[in-house]
Image (spheres, rainbow, N blue to C red):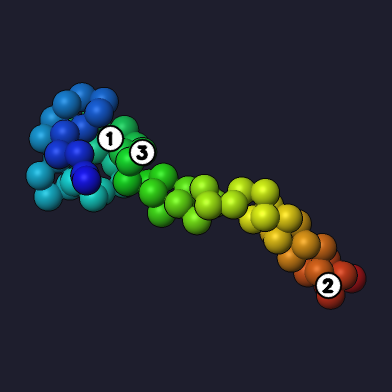
Amino acid sequence: MNRAKCPHCGVKLGNYAYADACPHCHEELVHNTRLLVATPKAKSPKAQSWLVRTFFRIVRCVES
Ligand SMILES: [Zn+2]
């Protein structure tokens, strides 16, 4: 379900319903930008951060 109106100024988004920012007030449309980033993390935030930390540790070991 997408919101047809901007939550900040209430302008009808129309073709901008999936845009990153409102075309009228230029505020970030959180329901669009957060979906892509937050959805995979929401499943297992602890496992994700552990994986990321381990990954960077490996990268650092390889680089040094
Ligand atoms: Zn707006």
- The numbered dot on residue 50 is none
- Residue 29 screen position, x and y as percent: 31, 38
Q: Nearer the viewer, residue 34 or 27?
A: 34
Amino acid type indicated by mark 1? His
Q: Quadrant of residue 27?
A: top left
Q: Is residue 54 above or below residue 24?
A: below
**Secondary structure beneath label 3:** helix
Q: Quadrant of residue 21?
A: top left
Residue at image x 84%, y 75%? 62
Judge the density around disc 2: few (<14), some (14-19), many (≥20) Cα neighbours within 10 Å: few
Judge the density around disc 1: few (<14), some (14-19), many (≥20) Cα neighbours within 10 Å: few
- Residue 50 screen position, x and y as percent: 73, 55
Quadrant where the C terminus is found in the figure: bottom right
The residue carrying mark 3 is 30
- Residue 34 screen position, x and y as percent: 41, 45
Q: CA distance from mark 3 to mark 2?
A: 36 Å
Residue at image x 78%, y 69%? 59
Label 1, ligand 1: CB separation under 8 Å? yes
Amino acid type indicated by mark 2? Glu
Indicate which label's residue lies in the foreground, 3 or 2: 3
Instruction: Decide if residue 10 is on the left or right side of residue 32.
Output: left
Q: Nearer the viewer, residue 22 or 53?
A: 53
Q: Nearer the viewer, residue 28 or 54?
A: 54
Residue at image x 67%, y 55%? 47
The residue carrying mark 2 is 63
Indicate which label's residue lies in the foreground, 3 or 1: 3
- Residue 11 screen position, x and y as percent: 13, 30
Judge the density around disc 3: few (<14), some (14-19), many (≥20) Cα neighbours within 10 Å: some
Amino acid type indicated by mark 3? Val
**Secondary structure beneath label 2:** helix
The residue carrying mark 1 is 26
